Image (tube, rainbow, N blue to C red):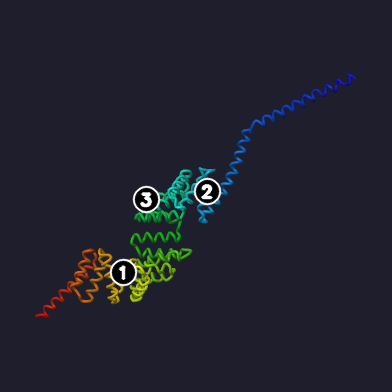
Amino acid sequence: MTDHATPALRFIKPMSLLVVMLVAMLVAMLVAGCGGPTKTGIEARKAANDRFNRVGSAVAFDQATQALEAGQFKAALDQIDRVVSSFPTDSKARLLRGRIVFEMGRLELAMREFKNAAELDPLCDECFYYQGVVAQRWGRDEEAARAYAAALTIDPTNTHYLLASAETLLVLNRVDDAKRLVDDSACHFEFNSALAHLRSEIATAEGDHAQALQLMELAVTLAPDPSLYQEDLAIVAFHSRDWDRCLKSMALLPTQVSDRADMIRIRARCMAMVGRSREARDLLIVFESRTTVTESITVDHDLTLGYIAWMIGDIERADICARRLMSRNPQLCDGFLLKGMILDRQGDFASAVQLLKKAQDLDPQRRVVRELLVRAEAAQLSLGGVSVALQR
């Protein structure tokens, strides 16, 4: 029996040894695993966590954008703060946060965020554009012009950047620079109503009112909504002395615009220039009757109504305006001029001369004052000569 068992035992022992070795290796692997994650595992886990955070941040970014567009600024700020907390070097998140706090009126913080975003992404055109918006809100036009120029350099095809840059140059009275900028950029905006409008503003600044009117007409033609430029067209037509075109444009304005005090004065002046002076006088009187507070009757109103009333022989109304002008604005020559004109018409040349001399003292360069004074003095001398002759 011993002889038959020996081969079997010889076979079992090597097999048992192999099993023991495999078990030992498995245990060693398990023990090693319990000691902590491998480097590859750590990196995989971090990548997964980053993907999760980015997905969550993307959702929060979209929600912040939607809240901003809906005017829900507090909710927008809460959402974007989650993004900035996870990704503080994300330039787009910083830019959006700047836009949100800007809408909340926190200009200092907005400017800081826009500058942070620009440092993180020097090619972020919006970052510079919004810096210009904040600077302009502060009245720092030179700083705004530099910021707009930087944005336009990054994206030379953006209409908003071109308009903002050129209009700021006009505010700074750098008309030649504005014109040069527009001319250099014209290839990008050949058929653009906003560019035509801007060119009209430049022509106005140069004193070329006829060209300004042509360009404004073009802006109205090109605009998807012509009503956007009707008010500007009326004003440009007025300055170019195209009275009929001005009245035509004003007829297309909404009531809340056409009934404004400045627009009523413009309409009255145009009506007077096309032979409708009585209608103009009545229009101004109706407007004045709706004005309950005396102080709200402006100098321009009295000037317009006073001269139109004098033109049609409404001396009483002209005299009321002249007296108001003299009492409220004693340093303005027009009150004394208008009163002198009234007295001259009434034949009181001596009193007219005194008032016209006062008007000349206040505005010695005004040609009409000098001419009326010379005429009133001549009439006074002539009347004096007649009186002497009659006495003799």
Amino acid type of the residue that numbered disc 3 sits on in the rendered structure: Glu
The image quarter containing residue 29 is top right
Say left or right for 222 vs 14: left
Q: Position of residue 202 (x, y in %)?
A: 37, 59
- According to the picture, the residue beneath numbered tag 2 turns out to be 80
Name above or below for residue 51 compared with residue 343.
Answer: above
Distance from label 2 to label 1 (Cα)? 55 Å
Q: Nearer the viewer, residue 7 or 94?
A: 94
- Label 2 with label 1: CB-CB less than 8 Å: no
Q: Residue furthest top?
A: 2
Q: Position of residue 107 (x, y in %)?
A: 43, 50
Q: Nearer the viewer, residue 273 or 300?
A: 300
Residue 142: give its label: 3
Could you classify mark 2 by the number of other residues whose Cα lies within 10 Å: few (under 14), some (14-19), or many (20 or more)? many
- According to the picture, the residue beneath numbered tag 1 turns out to be 302
Q: Nearer the viewer, residue 164 or 213?
A: 164
Say left or right for 95 vs 263: right
Could you classify mark 1 by the number of other residues whose Cα lies within 10 Å: few (under 14), some (14-19), or many (20 or more)? many
Q: Position of residue 68 (x, y in %)?
A: 51, 54
The image quarter containing residue 294 is bottom left
Residue drawn at the location 47% of the way across and 50% of the way down: 101
Q: Nearer the viewer, residue 385 or 104?
A: 104
The image quarter containing residue 305 is bottom left
Q: Secondary structure at mark 1?
A: helix
